[in-house]
Amino acid sequence: MALPALGPALPEIILALGAIAMVLIGAVQRERSTRLLEGIAIVLLAVALVLCVSASGTQTTFNNSFIADGFARFMKVLTLIGAAAAILLSADTLRRDGSMRFEFPILVVLATVGMMMMISANDLISLYVGLELQSLALYVVAAFDRDNAKSTEAGLKYFVLGALSSGMLLYGASLVYGFTGTVTFPGIAAATQGGHIGIGLIFGIVFIAAGVAFKISAVPFHMWTPDVYEGAPTPVAAFFASAPKMAAMAMVVRVFIGAFPGAIQEWRQIIVFISIASMALGAFAAIGQRNVKRLLAYSSIANMGYALIGLAAGTPDGVQGVMTYMAIYLATTLAAFACVLMMRRDGKLVEDINELAGLSRTNGWMAFAMSMMMFSLAGIPPLAGFWAKWYVFLAAIHAQLYVLAVIGVLTSVVGAYYYLRLVKVMYFDDAKPAFETADLGVRTVLLVSTIFVVALSFLPAPLFDSAAAAAKSLF
């Protein structure tokens, strides 16, 4: 029997072998190896990123169950950047709080392997294997601060609800296999071509949609998000808000565009409902929040709703909009969490929004960066977030989804209220004592993310062109 060509999966193989080596180093040196393992993790992620960027064309391996195309490479780059940023954000912060252990970078690398498998999955079995590899690592990461009751509660909630969603996804996959006779995405697409969609297959699509909606924290499977964001250590929440979201959204797009192009009228109704519900709940539920991490959790739910508008269009322009939206969302979210990690007084992190009062007078650079992120998330032109929403709304209009686009605009206006409230607190309220000096990794992530968002506001073409080229590989 001939061995499969391993070239398309080389980034994942390098990360997996690196994770095994990290486990052995950690087992021998224990806590003394923490800084070394953080450095190894960053190097591994950087090598995988270089391999993804340097590859070209469409390649498959493992009996066509793994595909490396333009879409996969684009989303993998975002995922790897999110994972590397999470390690930079966590290193000194978790060490200061006494909750850093050598297992953390290992778990991040293992989760990233699962995420990259999800992105490149070309059948339901490889998708499920990647999903479970990611989830098992994330269950542990969510409860990483095991001496903290809130962190333990967050981990337990995520585990229970995650197990439920995985079961629903697996049941949906079994229904799809039963009614199409295949688990490969091209095979399912061929079986559903011509619009011959039975009721059993529709049920399978519904269950799969429910399973993947949990992974992107979309309504009505969002209930874990605010509790996990608030309860988990802040760097862990930053990780949850970045890399896993990139992989999960890529998985959603790959499943519906790649496997069910002939059932677009059926699954579009599901995606439109999830999108509207997520935008509405994210916009209105965030208004009364006082904890900045819970506010960012509801913001994340709303942003996933906006991204799904592009998927609902079901066109190359729509997928391009999703990819552009996720890239800009990644930068703004990482910068926002970096600002949260800079909110430290008397050696402790503070999370109340009112603690930002008068920040412009005590730390003008941080206030400026946070304001840019809030304006961008609100979709105020000409910042990058405006272009992100512009492209998904435009794709919806071209697909004649006028009501969806209008609801998206209206919920953006509502969401602008709580984003701009943070700016008002930072610039117009009476100043509170200055925050302590932040760690180098946190400041680096904030600086790079802010430069990216501001630069993209005036020079968006490179990102849009890259996303357009990558989106075409799916069609």
Image (cartoon, rainbow, N blue to C red):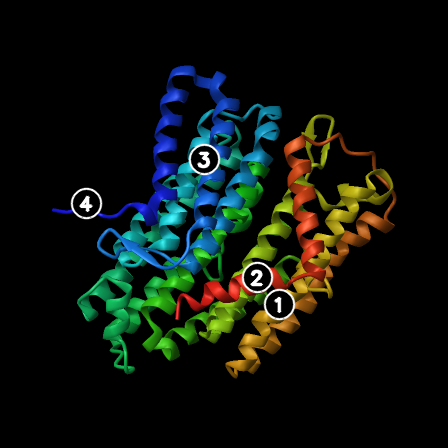
Q: Is mark 3 on a helix, strand or loop?
A: helix
Q: Quadrant of residue 139?
A: top left
What is the x, y in percent for residue 49?
Answer: 48, 44
Name the residue: 51% across, 73% down: 317
Name the residue: 53% across, 30% down: 148
Cα gap from disc 4 to disc 3, whole angstroms:
25 Å
Cα gap from disc 2 to disc 1, whole angstroms:
7 Å
Residue depth check, mark 2 versus mark 4: number of the one nearer the observer: 4
- Crowding around mark 2 (Cα neighbors within 10 Å: few <14, some 14 to 19, many 20+) is many
Q: What element carries label 2?
A: helix
Which residue was labeled with disc 1? 389
Closer to the camera in the image, 84 or 336: 84
Residue depth check, mark 3 versus mark 2: number of the one nearer the observer: 3
- The correct choice, above or below, for 387 with respect to 400 in the image is above
Which residue was labeled with disc 4? 3
Q: Is mark 4 on a helix, strand or loop?
A: loop
Find out whether the residues at labels 2 and 4 contact each other: C-beta distance under 8 Å. no
Name the quadrant of the C terminus.
bottom left
Disc with the residue nearer the chain's start (1 vs 4): 4
Cα gap from disc 2 to disc 4, whole angstroms:
39 Å
Say which mark, if any, is on residue 44.
3
User: Could you tell me the amino acid type at mark 4?
Assistant: Leu
Closer to the camera in the image, 35 or 93: 35
Cα gap from disc 1 to disc 4, whole angstroms:
45 Å
